[in-house]
Image (tube, helix red, strand yellow):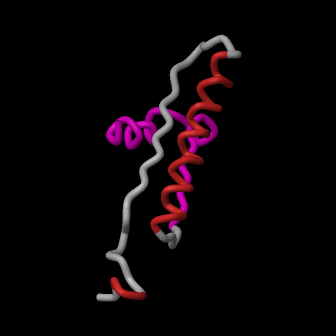
Amino acid sequence: MIDKGKESFDRFPDDERKFSGITMGIDEEGYEAFLQELRAFRMKVGELVQKHKANRVYRVNIGVFPVTKKFGGADKE
């Protein structure tokens, strides 16, 4: 799917594709809360699209991964 995302830059105009992201600092408790929100979002999107007739297929990717090692407190490196 990552390759399809890259290909979309050449295949489709800007107004037919959207890419966005956010970089954030968060602890384990906040991370778990964030994952719960992502689950709720996916369910809400699934319900929303069921109310509309499809004339095209879209893919939504949301990736969450660390960009640093843990820092601060007892885990300080």
Q: Which of these two is toward me, 13 or 57?
A: 57
Rendered image quadrant of residue 45: top right
Q: Which of these two is toward me, 7 or 27?
A: 27
The residue shown at (34%, 88%) is 76
Q: Is residue 4 magenta?
A: yes
From the viewer's perspective, is residue 62 above or below residue 57? below
Which corner quadrant holds the C terminus? bottom left
Rendered image quadrant of residue 75: bottom left
Rendered image quadrant of residue 33: bottom right
From the viewer's perspective, is residue 46 above or below residue 54? below
Q: Which residues are magenta?
A: 1-23
From the viewer's perspective, is residue 30 above or below residue 69? above
The residue shown at (41%, 40%) is 5
From the viewer's perspective, is residue 31 above or below residue 36? below
Give the percent coordinates (x, y) of residue 38.
55, 45
**Would you say 66 lies left or right of 48 here?**
left
